[in-house]
Image (cartoon, grey):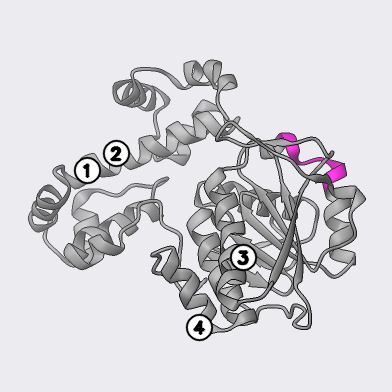
Amino acid sequence: MNSAFPSLPTDRPVRVGVLVLDDTNLLSLAAAVDPMRAANRFAGRRVFDWTYLTMTGSPARITAGFDIPGAAVGTVPVPDLLMLVASFSLDRQDTPALHRELRRMARGRAVIVAVDGAGWLLASAGLLDGQAATTHWEDLDRFAARFPRVETVRDRFRVSGRMLTTGGASPCLDMMLALIRHHAGADVAARVAGVFIYDPVHAGDAPQRLVPTLALSRRAPIVARAIAEMEAGLDAPVTMDQLSAQLGVSRRLLEQKFRATLGQSPHGYWLGLRLAEAQRLARDTDMAVQDIALACGFSSHAAFGRAFKAAYGTSVRDIRRLRGNWP
């Protein structure tokens, strides 16, 4: 359960520092910043006043291929609100210098928002110990294993005292709309959501999903429920008979619904989901191939290798040889 949003100044614009790290996703950055611009517009006053920051004062190169200039974070006073925006290359950017700046901000009573993968960096700095936090769904399991003192939750966003964590671009927009509603009023927040033509998920406690299934849950609720079970059991897949029993339907009906809705069998869909996660782990982590196989529900290294090669035409090792060219 989210705690109440922390208070921010109401007698002047909220001073915001937007700390952008290299390899940040542009959509996550926009989800953090553009709602503030729109809030200022619809409130008819400067509710938020933000400054871009980088670690060294040199521009941050984001994944869209251009630079975000900013002042060196170590040279600025502690703002009311610090937004730490980070997506990829987290291990490389998880430095003592960053930890020092984050702790300085925390000591100065800044409200700190971690956008996308930035929750990992807050946790590494020790600022989430004893608190609940989330991060992008791709990293939740590793996050929980790496930071046992943090209560890892699958929420879209989580407010824990003065620390706010989000699970990516769309959850960041949910969080920003909730923050605007708390600080500037429901009317301003509604107008901000309207200008983006965005229907927010108001509850930050709503879970992140590997596969967005909101529309599917209305059109084919059995399929949506089956996908939710599959996501929860990537490392320990059950038989289709077992899955059907869990859902309270026959295997024949489950297969009919999958083919009518998604054009494939539930077994084929589940295999694809597991292999997609294996591809992500191969690309974004240094996990051993055997560990990737186990994490994705393959008890046999050889069977995993064959399935992966059939799906992607390459091997985990080949992907890793090429990934130096990727963000």
Q: Are marks 3 and 1 in contact (CB under 8 Å)?
A: no
Helix, strand or loop at disc 1?
helix
Mark 3 is on which residue type?
Met
Residues 71 and 236: in front is: 71
Please name which of the two marks, 2 or 3, marks the residue nearer to the observer: 3
Q: Residue at x 39, y 69 (%)?
A: 199
Mark 4 is on which residue type?
Asp
Q: Which residues are magenta?
A: 92-98
Mark found first going from the N terminus, 3 or 4: 3
Q: Which residue is mark 3?
A: 36
Mark found first going from the N terminus, 3 or 1: 3
Q: Which residue is mark 1?
A: 267
Helix, strand or loop at disc 2?
helix
Mark found first going from the N terminus, 2 or 3: 3
Label number found at residue 187: 4
Reply yes or no: does residue 63 show up in magenta.
no
Image coordinates of residue 203 in percent, x first then y, are: 48, 75
Mark 2 is on which residue type?
Leu
Mark 1 is on which residue type?
His
Q: Are marks 2 and 1 in contact (CB under 8 Å)?
A: yes
Q: Residue at x 85, y 70 (%)?
A: 109
Q: Are marks 3 and 4 in contact (CB under 8 Å)?
A: no
Please name which of the two marks, 4 or 1, marks the residue nearer to the observer: 4
| Gap between marks 4 and 2 measured at Cα | 45 Å
Please name which of the two marks, 3 or 1, marks the residue nearer to the observer: 3
